[in-house]
Image (cartoon, grey):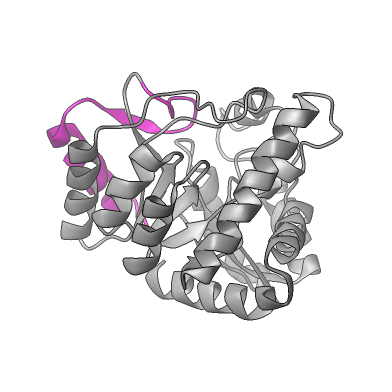
């Protein structure tokens, strides 16, 4: 049985704008059922969604039981206005507005809170992120507020400047986590932060011709090395493909994530991933 601990049911793995537009009049139940059937056929029994503001992940959770799948969703991700996340999430400007969004997520039945605290990798330029990280003090406050309301926290975070303060504040999981130094990796391991490195979002770009092949290979090599380092520190790793992202189809993307993590960890992979999945399911 498999788990994909980071998916986006609202997206289709091809073109995010067209995928989102297809749900503008309400979640497309035919699409959702087809994806859930695909996961079921491949042996996936646990899915954790990153959320969306159109209710697609929420509807998928409603339907998932019929497919024998446990489905978790934050309902919508929360981002700071003027920074990464506006294409899919709900934005805030003040901490009071953030608290209101947490309350709204609770009212809609959120299983956890997802925060966006950095940009994306620039796949054409190794080491470059698309946005500045959120300030450390604000990261701590967001996590503190969500934890105070009884929620686990999933953080979209790349770069040491975002991940280190999040780990120190007790964030429950870090998604993506590109370009981390030893201090950030050690902080995650020491604080029990689950890392979902979403290697498929990098590895599946190879051969597509969309980005610089050399930079993609360098980014992937860096991520694999950090996965190995994190595991050696006793850190908790869980498979999450970011299914729905470009070149990461639902179902097959999850299998690709298992392959890439196994390539990185070697014989240690089955036990490491089993331990990570169990820890993640206990929190989410």
When asked about the image quadrant of residue 110, the answer is: bottom left
Is there any visible trace of residue 237 in the rendered image?
no
Magenta segment boundaries in residue numbering: 83-111
Q: Determine whether 157 is above or below 68 in the image.
A: above
- Please tell me how many numbered marks the rendered image carries: 0
**Quarter of the figure that contains the C terminus:** bottom left
Q: Residue at x 64, y 38 (%)?
A: 11
- Whether residue 167 sits left or right of residue 200 in the image: it is left
Does residue 15 show up?
Answer: yes
Please report the residue visible at 60 percent of the width from the left and 62 percent of the height from the top: 228
Vertical position of residue 259 compared to residue 203: above or below: below
Q: Residue 254's x, y, as percent?
A: 71, 57
Instruction: Give percent across and percent down for residue 13.
Output: 72, 38
The location of residue 116, given as percent across then percent down, is 39, 38
Q: Is residue 187 left or right of residue 44?
A: left
Assess whether residue 10 is covered by the magenta stretch. no
Residue drawn at the location 46% of the way across and 55% of the way down: 73
Residue 204 percent location from the top left of the image: 77, 42
């Amino acid at each position: 049985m498999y788990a994909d601990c980071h998916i986006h049911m609202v997206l289709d793995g091809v073109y995010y704008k067209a995928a989102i537009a297809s749900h503008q009049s309400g979640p497309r139940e035919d699409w959702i059922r087809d994806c859930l059937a695909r996961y079921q056929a491949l042996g996936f029994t646990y899915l954790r969604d990153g959320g969306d503001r159109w209710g697609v992940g929420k509807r998928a959770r409603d339907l998932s039981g019929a497919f024998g799948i446990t489905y978790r969703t934050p309902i919508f991700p929360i981002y700071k206005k003027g920074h990464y996340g506006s294409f899919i999430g709900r934005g805030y400007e003040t901490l009071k507005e953030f608290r209101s969004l947490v309350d709204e997520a609770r009212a809609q039945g959120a299983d956890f809170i997802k925060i966006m605290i950095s940009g994306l990798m620039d796949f054409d330029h190794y080491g470059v992120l698309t946005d500045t990280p959120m300030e450390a003090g604000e990261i701590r406050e967001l996590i503190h507020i969500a934890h105070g309301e009884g929620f686990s926290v999933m953080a979209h975070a790349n770069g040491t400047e975002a991940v280190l303060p999040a780990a120190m504040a007790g964030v429950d999981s870090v998604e993506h986590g590109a370009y981390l130094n030893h201090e950030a990796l050690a902080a995650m391991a020491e604080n029990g932060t689950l890392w979902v490195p979403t290697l498929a979002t990098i590895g599946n770009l190879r051969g597509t011709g969309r980005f610089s092949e050399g930079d993609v290979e360098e980014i992937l090599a860096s991520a694999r090395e950090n996965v190995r380092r994190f595991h050696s520190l006793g850190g908790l790793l869980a498979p999450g493909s970011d299914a729905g992202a470009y070149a990461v189809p639902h179902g097959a993307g999850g299998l690709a994530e298992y392959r890439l993590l196994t390539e990185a960890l070697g014989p240690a992979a089955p036990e490491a991933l089993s331990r990570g999945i169990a820890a993640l399911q206990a929190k989410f």
